[in-house]
Amino acid sequence: MPDEMASLIRRHGGVPVGAAVLQEHYLTDSPDVQQAIADVCDGRVDAAIFLTGVGANAMMGIADSMSRLAEFETALRETTVIARSPKPARILRRHKIPIDIMPPEPYTSSDLTAAMASLDLNGKRVIFQRYGGPDSELPTYLRERRADYRELTLYDWGLPNDTAPVLRLIDRIEQGEVDALAFTSRPQVPNLLAIAETAGREESLKRSLSGPVAVASVGPVCTRKLVESGISVDIEPDHPHMGSLVMAVAEYFDTHS
């Protein structure tokens, strides 16, 4: 939501400078996903876990392309439905699908598995959609609980077709024209570094981010990825929302001016 993000930054007196480092690649013809939808429709799934709004929306779209959307919605109403955060919950509610379990903020994998602790998963047939990147915590938890689970890949976060705007942003960061760099999702981190590495700029970018540029992370999942990548985080809001992130950046500069 670049326009919404830019509007929030302007509202707090900042000047937005952005570049897309992600491009969603939907896997609409995946036989695994189509089979999972058919299994839900035929009552062969006990629980469905939706981790992202993008993934929930993609799954509804695939069911629609199979001419089974209404059937899929009806079947999910008879299935234990788990949403990791308000984003997939919003999509599910749009389709009038009740949500049985949703963890509290900040919606990490640990929060999700803790919220699922009361479920009897032994031998239960569970499907869940991947983030678009590897996540070992949920599969490990499901194995330990002896669930019969399937992990579905509905999309991945590829690099943008045109990386020139990202390279221009890196130029501006290194030239001291950017005061803060905000990350709104975990996949942005490896993608930005991959683009920088291809251009021979990864180390110089990291030096800039460890110096005068304040690094802001939307929440703990994103923060963990930044730290793993050798980038210190200066700002993280109390709530993992885009609006809270912008407010936290504004407050940071108010106290550091």
Image (cartoon, rainbow, N blue to C red):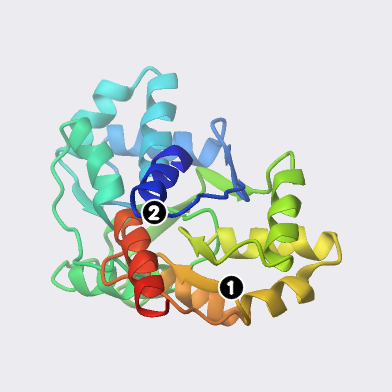
The amino acid type of the residue labelled 1 equals Val
Q: Is residue 96 above or below residue 201?
A: above
Residue 187, quarter of the rendered image: bottom right
**Residue 222 in the image, given as x and y percentages of width and height:** 46, 69
**Residue 113 in the image, given as x and y percentages of width and height:** 27, 71
Name the side, left or right, on which 146 lies relative to 234: left
226 or 93: nearer the viewer: 226
Name the side, left or right, on which 54 lies relative to 47: right
Look at discs 1 and 2 and give the one toward the viewer: 2
Q: Which residue in the rendered view is the most extreme toward the front?
A: 257
Helix, strand or loop at mark 2: loop
Measured in 3D between alpha carbons, the distance from the residue under mark 1 to the one under mark 2, in whole angstroms, is 17 Å
Mark 2 highlights which residue? 13
Mark 1 highlights which residue? 213
**Residue drawn at (74%, 65%) of the image:** 175
**Residue drawn at (57%, 30%) of the image:** 29
Q: Is residue 243 above or below residue 201?
A: above
**Residue drawn at (63%, 81%) of the image:** 211
Name the side, left or right, on which 25 lies relative to 102: right
94 or 105: nearer the viewer: 105
The tag earlier along the polypeptide, 1 or 2, is 2
Residue 13, quarter of the rendered image: bottom left
How many other residues sit within 10 Å of disc 2, few (<14), some (14-19) or many (≥20)? few
